[in-house]
Amino acid sequence: MEALDDILERYSVTDPSLDTDGKLLGASFVVLRNQEIVYSGSRGQRSLEPTARPWTADTFTWIASMTKLITSTCLMQLVEAGKIGLDDDVRSLVPQLKAMQVLEGFDDAGKPLLRDNLDPITLRILLTHATGLPYDALSPDLQRWSKAVGRSASSADWTLEGFTTPLVFSPGTSWTYGTSIDWASLVLEAVTKDTLGTYFRQNIFEPLGMRHTGFFPLQLPHIADQVATWAYRDENGTGLSTGEPWKTDTPAIESGGSGLHSTAADYARFLAGLLGGELVSSKTLDEMFRPQLDGAVATALEQTAHSGGYVPEILAGTPLNHGLAGLINMADMKGKRSAGSMMWTGAANGRWWIDRKTGVAGVLVVNVTPYGDKILEAMFDELEKTVYGSLLDGSN
């Protein structure tokens, strides 16, 4: 697929002048068809130094919320093994969940109004983000609550204190994007008596040969010469600057919601293993891809995802739902993925999708912030259309 090479070339920093206008520092794109890699391409470079090494499929960077698919798969392994049920109330396993109250608002003096939560928090609710636990940055109410109680921690800290907030609605009654998968990770640790990193290593990374993936880059010395410099989009929306990544210290928690660093090659290994039956059974995979939400919860998901810019690759108005590991488009996308496909993205603007109907899956790894990079979005739209045009004659 030479056309894919051309797209990556056009959108990546490749010329000696290091012109960044309308460019990404680098990008890796891997496409699978029926678990086999049919395309793997990379363009760009790992920094803006004149002597920078090229960006490759083994370039190592933060994959942010692309972590969630791996965490959700691990939880489904436990469900498949009978160690926990999707509809078990997990509050007894994680004391902080049991203690959480519901934030109902604020009185005239600005004091938070809280009530006890009487509703169960199930694993299914956590995996579908129907818990009522948004990221602080996405919730004015949580920001106001934090100020009122003198809280300096936030969910971006990757600490238990940062993840611990009130619920903004009763579990199972609406939808909001946030720390639910991090709490599901603590459920996994309670059930297995292992750390999240240990479980990942023993049940995902080692079986699949994912040597370049982990929570703590400093514990992976063999990737030292593969690390990409962090890229920031300039305020004008076109140029780039580089600098330190947003988080340089060692986090207190292995964040199952957004903590992994990886490569495109490793993530493709994961997708192939997931779809090829190496991680869960076909029955479990079917359940992961089954739409889980209905009524007001599904409506809240659609409104939030479309209005909040979470999924720019999906046309506004497309019906959406959520499986046990990602967002599902409920209608065909013309010239692109089929109805029933699952996807998610990350704060570093990478993304993955799985189209089981056609057997097509893909992963794009980049590292540019802030989220919602318009140049990245334009490139990905071209890439996906070209994939389906080449493999399936754009039949959707």
Image: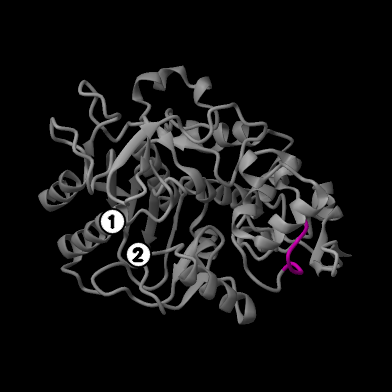
Front-lying residue, 164 or 363? 164
Label 1 packing within 10 angstroms: few (<14), some (14-19), many (20+)? many
Above/below status of 255 relative to 388 = above
Which color scheme is applied? one colour
What amino acid is labelled 2 in the image? Glu
Instruction: Determine the residue located farthest toward the bottom in the rendered image.
Output: 295
Q: Is residue 2 left or right of residue 101?
A: left
Residue on which disc 2 sits: 313
Q: Residue 41 placed where, x, y %?
A: 22, 42
- Give the image location of residue 246, x and y in percent: 50, 36
Residue at label 1? 380
Q: Is residue 89 above or below residue 331?
A: above
State which quadrant residue 335 falls in.
Answer: bottom left
Q: CA distance from mark 1 to mark 2?
A: 8 Å
Residue 147 in the image: above or below residue 118: above
Residue 47 seen by the camera: yes
Labels 1 and 2 touching (C-beta < 8 A): yes
Residue 199's disc is: none
Indicate the quadrant containing the C terminus: top left, top right, bottom left or bottom right.
Answer: bottom left
The boundaries of the magenta stretch are 165-171
Looking at the image, which residue is at 71% across and 70% down?
A: 172
Going by the numbered disc 1, the residue's amino acid type is Phe
Residue at position x 38%, y 64% from top? 312
Name the residue at the front extreme: 109
Residue at the spot 31% in from the left edge and 73% down from the top edge: 333
